[in-house]
Amino acid sequence: ADQLVKAGGFKVVVACRDPTLGEKAAQELGAQFERLDLASDESIDDFAKRVASKHGRLDILVNNAGLAFKAADPTPFEQQTGPTLKVNFWGTTRLTDALLPLLRASAAQGQGPRLVNVASMAGRLGQVSPELQQRFSSRDLTREVLNGLISKFEQDVAAGRHSQEGWGKSNYGLSKLAVIAYTKIVAREEGDAMRVNACCPGYCDTDMTSHRGSRPPAQGAENAVKLALLPDAGPTGEFWQDLHVSSW
């Protein structure tokens, strides 16, 4: 948000669950604040309605919210699955789908909208079986099939058979794999109307990494900002790392 504010020409809205922290950040950045909780369908729907009412269109959407259990968290793996996917995949896709009409409104006005989903190198395809890799990476993959795959992962984890079914051992990794697959679906759906990409910010020094990451947050954010400011002929439907298109 800071880099987009400094780029100029944008009315930047930051959103998070905590209104105290959100208001403070918005004031420091010179942005506007809206409350949003990706774990709540009601919050997502209300947020989309407020943005539509106040602004009428959306030129850039950067989905940066995420949830990751700490490695030392005693919560059993199967109890981490639902909360992780609720925020990282189901919440992110619900929010994006609710805001796509505003991005399309921007396109109709010739603004060249951008959609950026912050994913992770943890979302690599290689974490699942070759059969699942083919399904996730297929250019014929649809929203319905993707949603069905993620639901099946949840069911397989609950039944204790996810390893036998070809899934990996990371809820967070699978959630980010799903976000990358979703990004590619939306890019195919929207065509040249907007640039739609996903990126990995790198291992950053943030609360999520317990400040173990070596990369400053501002440097990690450069990946998302580059995609938010891509030229109209820039790549779409790609996964980026270190400011370049990367293999998935």
Image: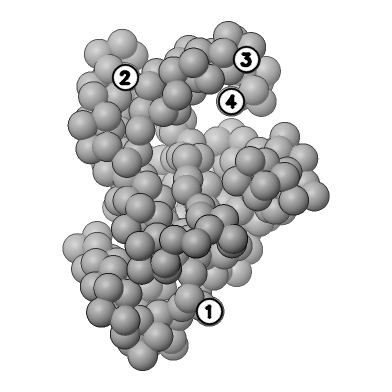
Q: Position of residue 200 (x, y in %)?
A: 61, 53
Q: How many marks?
A: 4
The residue wearing badge 4 is 1
Mark 4–mark 3 contact, CB under 8 Å?
Answer: yes
Disc nearer the start of the sequence (1/3): 3
Marker disc for residue 29? 3
Rendering coords of residue 134 (x, y %): 39, 81
CB under 8 Å between callouts 2 and 3?
no
For residue 80, which quarter of the picture?
bottom left
Q: Quadrant of the N terminus?
A: top right
Give the residue number, with chain letter if any, for mark 1.
126
Q: Disc number at residue 51?
A: 2
- The single residue placed furthest to the right in the displayed view is 214
Measured in 3D between alpha carbons, the distance from the residue under mark 2 to the one under mark 3, in whole angstroms, is: 19 Å
Mark 3 residue crowding within 10 angstroms, few (<14) / some (14–19) / many (20+): some
Q: State the SS at label 1.
A: helix
Question: Looking at numbered disc 4 in the image, what kind of residue is underneath it?
Answer: Ala
Q: Secondary structure at mark 2?
A: helix
**N-term-proximal mark, 2 vs 3:** 3
Q: CA distance from mark 2 to mark 1?
A: 38 Å
Residue at 28% x, 68% y: name it: 154
Q: Residue at x 31, y 85 (%)?
A: 161
Tell me the element at label 3.
helix
Nearest to the observer: residue 100 or residue 48:
48
